[in-house]
Image (spheres, rainbow, N blue to C red):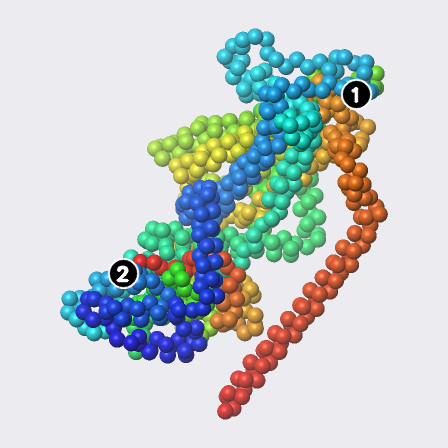
Amino acid sequence: MGTTASQLAKDSLSEYQELTFLTKQEILLAHRRFTELLDRDERNHPNPRVPMEVILTLPELKSNPFKTRICQVFSTSEDKDGSLTFEDFLDLLSAFSDSATLEIKSHYAFRIFDFDDDGTLDCGDLEKLVNCLTGETEDTRLSSEEMRQLISNILDESDIDKDGTVNLSEFQHVISRSPDFVSSFKIVL
Amino acid sequence: MFSPTNFRQVQQMQAPAQFSGGSWKQKKTIFVRKFKSNVREFLYFFSLWGKTLQKIGGNFGGGVQSYFIFLRFLVVLNFVSFLLIAGFVLIPSIVFRSVDIKPEITADVLCFLCADCLKYDPNPQGLVVFYEFFLDLLSGTGFMEYSYMFYGYYNNTVVVTSLVGSDFSYNIPLAYLLTAVFYFAFCLICIIARDVRSYSMIVFTGWDYGCLGSKATKLKQRNIYYRLQVDLEEERLKKHAASLTLCNKVTLYSLLCVKLAPCACFLGLFYTYLPSIVITTGNFLVPLLCDQIALLEKYPPSATVVVALLRAVVLRLVSLGILLYTLWNQIVCHGSTDTCPCHYNHSNYQCWETSVGQEMYKLTLFDLLVSIALLVLVEFPRRMVVDHWSCNLTQWVGRQEFVVPSNVLGLVYGQTVVWTGALFCPLLPLINTVKFVILFYCKKITLFYNCRPALRTFRSTTSAFFFLAVLLFGWILYFNVASLRIIDSASPNRIHPSFACGPFRSFLRMWKIVPDSLAILPKGTRDFLFFIGSQAFSVPLFAVSCVFMCYFIALASIYGKSVAMLRAQLKLVCVFFFLIITVK
């Protein structure tokens, strides 16, 4: 069950601690920040759902180029509109926390980069990914020639079965060679 | 109850469930990982000028940033080298001098008649006028000549007896030589060792999710953009270079030589007078001339830049080589042994190593002074004129653009000078560290105040790979000078180390200290070392290495073949399953 009023029940707290990678303080802080995002009348709702635009006002997510994808990946709403309940929010923080394993992080990173949600990273996904990384402004966009060269290099390096897309195992193989990934894939409130 | 939807979703994607309970093994992995990341963060704290480099990269592009990264690398290299020299040569010398251990005056058996070879009188006469003090500071003469700065001050003390009751021995000449050798080997390793970057790593792991604020985000985005651009350009350049046909290559090289010949003759005349000032001026003017000539030729754009760069590199290093050759000619005797009992020109150069060291010191110092003078007298006024006085001429000239290749050449030239001079001026790496630090801040100031922001058109050859390759070329030049000519020269024109000064005064050649020291070692160790160096050991070792190499090459080719086979199988299996599913 979700939160009751504006206080977190003790058994919920210990349950959340058991089921996520967050510590007690982190869960309490998350609860406080989440409650601040709610309207007065929503706070009495048993399981409030916050729309994506409100979530994106959080300073930790506001300037992140992947903010929309992050909300969409962790959202459990039927219409995939990126709205989050408190438990979705905890899911998000848990995946981005300090103690989450490489497996969890690489799994969620893959889902975030998979813009069309088809389970693999194809050329369209990679192009959108690179555009997010370099910014959408005119002077920081790679030319189509450079983009093509870059995508073919990426596929050369990471596509082991040569099917033209990067699947989850190939992605995790690349991630495992990077020493910085775990420390950079971190959002702390 | 925790909502089951999350778990269902998780099971669908076959992700491992998120729970923190976990086994002890998992906890241990997490702890190890946290510890490693803490250590890395701690070390990152010591990385010099990190924030400045990010700011430069974001505002001026990857090319300019790579220049500053290269400069930082050289600062660290020089500082570590200085620590090496200080630890093994400088501090023991200071200690022995303070303990007042007298230098050995053993005359070489070939020169037992020439007392004036042993004469060395560098001390100034009494008080010096202030301007003379200043001149001495700039040219390394006077009070600076007989100091820890130059080779001449170090003694050939060999301490073998117990000083404080314990068994302590220290051989200053051996330490001097071996430190020099290790310093250069260390530099070579630093140049060659390079971490490999990969595109997929940059793209998949490049973003820092903890980055807050739109300004920091934009900076990071621009950094990634420029980084990708630099790597892509470098790859295109390599592909282009590889695709040049043999005919094109021959044409390029011959044109290069033809252009260089008159330049070299012209400069050769000047090098007998005022070497340091003229070299610096020549280095400044001739690349400009070459740039103008390059405009007339019709190469493809990237080739033009490469050719211009190669030309400038060779020119600068050739000018240094000519200087060294001139010095060599002045020091060596050109007559028979009768007119020249000391085997070097002792009338002009009582301590020739110190003179060489002084020349290198002067070059380094003038290089720095010219850079600062250019900054103050040319770049700032140019910006002021362009900003406050708008007419056609100033608009055409425009604001300064930070030209990376020629700046990098300046660094490589400075470093090569230091390598050539480090054997004769042990404190030169320290001076060079200070010089490069000052240069970093000066260049940073001029970049932010005087230069245009990054242009759309991106210039190639700004890659670290290219800089390091050019630096390696400079290293090879030094290696030829130092090792073949001085330390162990076998030619009849060789120069004897100075009799009157320095740690090698009693040796025929500098390298001779090593076999002599080996002779002191106990018989067992000596036999072992000679055995390792002898043919009876090295030939079988070489044969065994060849066998291992063949084995590993065969293994690699077998693995390559099996990988290709497995890939084909994987494709086949995927197609097979796809067919089965569609049929069902």
Name the quadrant containing residue A107: bottom left
The reply to whether residue B260 is in sight is no
> Which residue corresponds to the image point at 39% horizontal and 67% vertical from the top-left?
B20
**In x, y percent, where is residue B36?**
48, 54
Task: Between residue B560 and residue B467, name the one nearer to us.
Answer: B560
Task: Between residue B207 and residue A92, name the one nearer to us.
Answer: A92
**Residue identified by numbered label 2:** A29
**In x, y percent, where is residue B512?**
76, 31
Q: What amino acid does circle 1 point to? A: Asp
Work out which quarter of the rendered image holds the N terminus of chain B and state it: bottom left
> Which residue corresponds to the image point at 77% horizontal and 18% vertical from the top-left?
B107
**Residue identified by numbered label 1:** B108
Task: Between residue A135 and residue B109, name the one nearer to us.
Answer: B109
Is B359 situated left or right of B209 in this image?
right
Name the quadrant containing residue B553: bottom right
Name of the residue lying farthest toward the left: A41
Work out how far the residue at label 1 is from the one at label 2, CA to CA, in angstroms. Answer: 82 Å
- Other residues around mark 1 within 10 Å, as few (<14) / some (14–19) / many (≥20): some
> Which residue corresponds to the image point at 18% horizontal and 69% vertical from the top-left?
A5
- Other residues around mark 2 within 10 Å, as few (<14) / some (14–19) / many (≥20): few
Name of the residue lying farthest toward the front: B165
Chain of the residue under the numbered disc 1 shown in the image: B
The reply to whether residue A159 is in sight is yes
